[in-house]
Amino acid sequence: MKRRILILHTGGTIGMEATPGGLKPMAGFGPLLKRRLGETASAAPLPDCDVVELDRLIDSANLQPAQWPVIAGELVRRWEAYDGFVVLHGTDTMAWTASALSFMLRGLDKPVILTGAQIPLTAPRSDALENLEMALILAAQHPIREVSICFGRKLLRGNRSRKIATDRFDAFDSPNYPPIAEAGIKIALHRELLLAAEAKAFFLPEHFEPEAVAVLTIHPGLSSPVVEVALSSSHLRGVVLRSYGVGNVPEADARLLAALGGAVARGVTVINTTQCVFGAVAQDTYATGTALARIGVVSGGDMTLEAAFAKLHVLIAERLGPEEIRARMVQPLCGEITTTA
């Protein structure tokens, strides 16, 4: 039986057109996309698909956490009617949305594949159809039970992915986890890398508090007063710390450590991630890292910034207490972190 796939268009370059003011969402993109897919179906048999557009398309750079449950809700409402889902999304924040969806749709039993384009569908040399065709084939033909990103002939775990290039067709990579699938003459799916089947545990919060999670990047000369102000918000519940190397900060700055320790004492979860593309945080390597452990900062291992940020938002929205959030941040919920055990 031929499978049915839903294409959910949320916005992004793939569905834009040139205007005097720059690229903007084009009218009539859904019917145009269906027509273009029909023209290519003879060369690459594709599943039956429907195209649904959000009422308000999202420019990727304008994405807010509040829009993640909107996207997830569109999928969940149609979950039983389709065999798989392809989400068209802007590239700038695609990895952030893929991470958030992975935590909201834990235990899914169908593929949710995000894709998009570096060049609009209607423009010369567009990569849109190649990305979309591969996403549709994977969504229809393979037993993928996770949220992933299909881009540049690779399928990547969504919560391991990062946008790594502004001007290349292979704009995404998952530096600390191998591609789930790769396209050459044939599409090679690495089944041993897929998430195992689990009980469905969907969670669509009614509200994400936009000020609940902050990102703090360590850099030479970082002002302690600036950090104190950033950590002073009464709405703050989680911080993603972007540290040097294996998790180091300037431990000689007692005021900085006091600000971080004070936030932890107030119930703020501080998760330590590395600014490096490859590798993981190991807070016990240097004195500058063990200083963080002493004040209660949690090691984020090899989690990406995008995954740590989204995971904090979802756990906070679940109304968990600080200790439970800290415990779950170091546990893999859907393949986002490598355990050392």
Image (cartoon, rainbow, N blue to C red):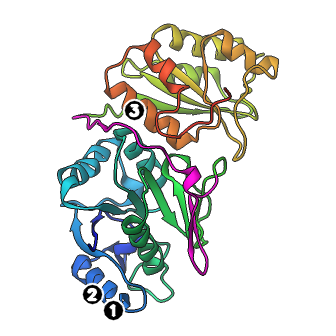
Residue drawn at 60 percent across, 71 percent down: 167
Asked which secondary structure carries label 3, the reply is: helix
Chain-order first, disc 3 or disc 1: 1
Q: In the rendering, which numbered label is found on residue 39? A: 1
For residue 180, above or below residue 68? below
Position in image of residue 10 (x %, y %): 30, 61
Side (left or right) of 186 relative to 55: right
- 2 and 3 marks in contact (CB < 8 Å): no
- Mark 1 to mark 2: distance in Å? 6 Å
Which is more toward the observer, 336 or 231? 336
How busy is the neighbourhood of tag 3: few (under 14 within 10 Å), some, or many (20 plus)?
Answer: many
Residue drawn at 24 percent across, 61 percent down: 82
Position in image of residue 56 (x %, y %): 22, 60
Q: In the rendering, which numbered label is found on residue 35? A: 2
Q: Amino acid at mark 2?
A: Arg
Quarter of the rendering containing residue 27: bottom left
Q: Magenta stretch: residue 190 in it?
A: yes
Give the quadrant of the C terminus: top right
* Residue wearing tag 3: 313
Main secondary structure of the magenta stretch = loop
Q: Amino acid at mark 1?
A: Glu
**In this figure, what is the number of numbered marks?**
3
Magenta residues? 178-206
